[in-house]
Image (cartoon, grey):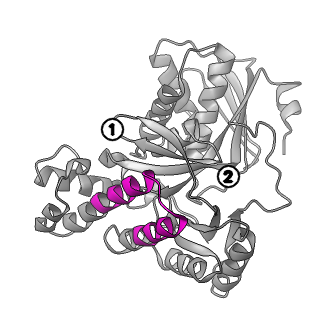
Amino acid sequence: MVTLENFFGGAPQAHESAPGRVNLLGEHTDYNDGFMLPIATPQRTEVALGASHDDHFHVYSATLDAAVAFRSNGHAPAGFASYIEGCIRLLERRGIEVPPLRVYVSTELPVGSGLSSSAALEVATLRALRSLLAIELDDVSLARIAQRAEIEYAKVNCGIMDQMASSLADREHMLFVDARSLAFRLQPMPDGSELIVIDSGVPRSLATSKYNERRAECAEAARRLGLSALRDVRDPASVEALAAPYRQRARHVVQENLRVLEASRGVTAERFGVLMNASHASLRDDYEVSIHELDELAACLRRAGGVFGARLTGAGFGGACVALCRAGMARQAAEAACASYSAGQRQGRILIPVPHAQSSGPGAGK
């Protein structure tokens, strides 16, 4: 593995980081102009920049021990460098000149776990470019550019939640986001609670999953209802007139928005857990994005002592589960859930609480 100092021949010119996110409620609502409640992860992605000595961008991932180079007027190959290229090209469209650079990336976020390692990479890259080039760019605008980078260059037709969370959330508060207006506010976690996140051991890839199919189904459901987006459904019963699968997809989105709005008004940890359990059932039965391993892991978490509720987090088709637990019991409950889940073929990995051996690394602030 190439060290930061060896890659740059000294210190980089800019060094920024961004967190991943865990979504507590509001799954698959962002691209339906809906509402969501993510929180930042302790794990972060770091991006360092320095001048290139030729007409190429040179990108190195310390996590993958992989290097990529592409001409300043060329394109990066598919993979992690395409996210970085997307950020660069979108700034250039704004009239910002980005010189050829050396880019060093490292991350604590497990790829494919559903904690949005891609958004963290995009936001960290844009933060580093903002710092290096002294760009005037607020955090919401930065999130919007990051989203466009993923859509256009990684070919994932994602909503705005992941980038908003990576750009604006912290580790102590939930971030309430309105995907239509991009209004947001930080609000406290339910009293007496803390989080557990466990990776199921089943990686997922949004580009090869049915994510884009679900998004198209929601757009069609809204069209059949005569609405611009499912967020605009006023009577939840109205979706029951739709044919399958549009009925089920719309039902999930409408009910999920209601769960987020209820939680955003402030509820007890017990009630929040009930909403999480209902969210998982809806994602499993109506949205059909869960898999056996996620269902089993969520069940193992619910059986662990002190857990109020559990659900898959992220787009589904693999990744992680999140649980809300009584304060002070998270590590014990996580270990019990992992021991039970690991009796199967897959091995669970605790991501939150962060294992004692894992360092939060430099740049652990926002």
Residue at coordinates 70% horizontally, 69% vertically from top-left? Answer: 330
Q: Nearer the viewer, residue 324 or 198?
A: 324
Query: Can residue 98 be seen by looking at this rendering?
Result: yes
Residue at coordinates 60% horizontally, 24% vertically from top-left? Answer: 71
Residue 326, x across and y down, in percent? 65, 69
Mark toward the start of the polypeptide (1 vs 2): 2
Name the quarter where the C terminus is drawn.
Answer: top right
What residue type is disc 2 on?
A: Leu
Residue at coordinates 23% horizontally, 46% vertically from top-left? Answer: 229
Q: Is residue 272 magenta?
A: yes
User: Which mark, residue 109?
Assistant: 2
Give the vertical position of 293 relative to 134 (above or below): below
Residue 300, x across and y down, in percent? 59, 81
Give the vertical position of 228 relative to 140 (above or below): below
Query: Can residue 81 be seen by looking at this rendering?
Result: no
Q: Nearer the viewer, residue 27 or 293?
A: 27
* Crowding at mark 1 (Cα within 10 Å: few <14, some 14-19, many 20+): some
Dot 1 lies on which element? loop
296 left or right, relative to 244: right
User: Which mark, residue 180?
Assistant: 1
Cα separation between marks 1 and 2: 28 Å
Dot 2 lies on which element? loop
Tell me the magenta residue range: 254-279
Residue 347, x across and y down, in percent? 68, 77
Q: Is residue 188 magenta?
A: no
